[in-house]
Image (cartoon, grey):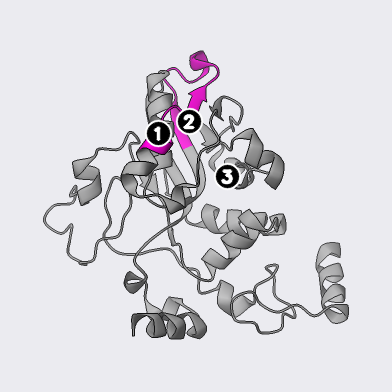
């Protein structure tokens, strides 16, 4: 209550615009975003790969084959058992994650955690949460691990403990986003380790991340954990990269749709 009053007062003195649509913020409940843009963030619907949660283009893709996996999962089987990534990595959620992750706007952690909690599967038979770790070098620069902050918000909802010191990143690798698939695999070789294998032996682990792109990082973490004795490793990410053409236009701000139209033209 007090924080809401202070936020309202600060906006009177120092007006703030919505990050996505640039409209002035007034009584909006989420920092840096107006209510209209935030309500555009909706869980992905329709058939998807049962392994990596990649959306299929056809609405009938799994009608006659419910266990049909995508091409990537069939040609290079990942080490994780399943992925849940409920939202598309597009604006305005993409804007929020960028502010949260790269500009230190940790005030968004509660709102992002609430989005993820709201979209959790009904039942998860797992034992412990593990955030994807950062190497100490970027951790010192950023001063927080965004995956750990998300895990801290959803742990109570799942009733699961959080283990954040056992799985570690031993190599400060190049950013995965700039690399092709083959280079991503090579880039992460020997990048992760388990400090206490006895603590993961037989465990069913849920890895937590902010964005799921190709799954290379999650798969390598799962491989290391399973080698250490984990019984199962699944993945929960806030958002998943998808073809923008598969996201309904009604989910996107008008400015985003117009920009995509310009780029496609």
At 53% across and 41% down in the image, what residue appears?
158
Cα–Cα span, label 2 and label 1: 8 Å
Say which residue label 1 marks. Answer: 220
Asked if the residue at tag 1 contacts the one at tag 2, i.e. Cβ–Cβ closer than 8 Å, the answer is: yes
Cα–Cα span, label 2 and label 3: 17 Å
- Answer above or below: position of 64 versus 60: above
| Relative image position of residue 88 (x, y in whole percent) | 43, 63
Count neighbours of disc 1 (C-alpha within 10 A) and say few if under 14, some if 14 to 19, many if 20 or more: many
Q: Of helix, strand and loop, which one carries label 2? A: loop
Count neighbours of disc 3 (C-alpha within 10 A) and say few if under 14, some if 14 to 19, many if 20 or more: many
Cα–Cα span, label 1 and label 3: 16 Å
| Relative image position of residue 231 (x, y in whole percent) | 37, 24
Q: Nearer the viewer, mark 2 or mark 1?
A: 2
| Relative image position of residue 112 (x, y in whole percent) | 59, 57
In the rendered image, the residue lying farthest to the left is 64
Q: For residue 11: magenta?
A: no
Which of disc 3 and disc 1 is earlier in sequence?
3
Which of disc 1 and disc 2 is earlier in sequence?
2
Quadrant housing the C terminus: bottom left
Q: Of helix, strand and loop, which one carries label 1? A: helix
Range of magenta residues: 186-206
Say which residue label 3 marks. Answer: 147
Q: Which mark is residue 191?
A: 2
């Amino acid at each position: 209550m007090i924080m809401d009053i202070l936020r309202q007062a600060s906006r009177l003195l120092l007006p703030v615009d919505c990050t996505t649509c640039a409209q002035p913020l007034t009584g909006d409940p989420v920092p840096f975003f107006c209510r209209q843009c935030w309500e555009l963030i909706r869980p992905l619907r329709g058939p998807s790969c049962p392994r990596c949660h990649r959306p299929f283009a056809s609405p009938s893709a799994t009608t006659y084959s419910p266990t049909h996996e995508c091409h990537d999962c069939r040609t290079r089987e990942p080490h994780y058992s399943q992925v849940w990534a409920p939202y598309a990595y597009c604006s305005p959620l993409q804007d929020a994650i960028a502010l949260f992750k790269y500009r230190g706007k940790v005030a968004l952690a509660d709102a992002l955690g609430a989005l993820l909690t709201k979209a959790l599967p009904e039942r998860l038979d797992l034992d412990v949460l593990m955030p994807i770790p950062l190497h100490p070098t970027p951790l010192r620069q950023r001063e927080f691990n965004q995956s750990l902050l998300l895990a801290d918000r959803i742990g109570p909802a799942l009733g699961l403990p959080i283990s954040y010191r056992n799985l570690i990143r031993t190599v400060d690798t190049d950013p995965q986003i700039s690399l092709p698939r083959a280079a991503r695999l090579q880039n992460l070789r020997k990048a992760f380790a388990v400090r206490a294998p006895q603590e993961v032996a037989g465990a069913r682990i849920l890895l937590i991340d902010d964005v799921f792109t190709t799954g290379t990082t999650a798969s390598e973490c799962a491989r290391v954990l399973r080698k250490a004795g984990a019984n199962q490793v699944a993945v929960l990410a806030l958002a998943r990269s998808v073809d923008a053409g598969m996201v309904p236009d009604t989910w996107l701000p008008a400015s985003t749709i117009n920009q995509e139209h310009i780029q496609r033209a």
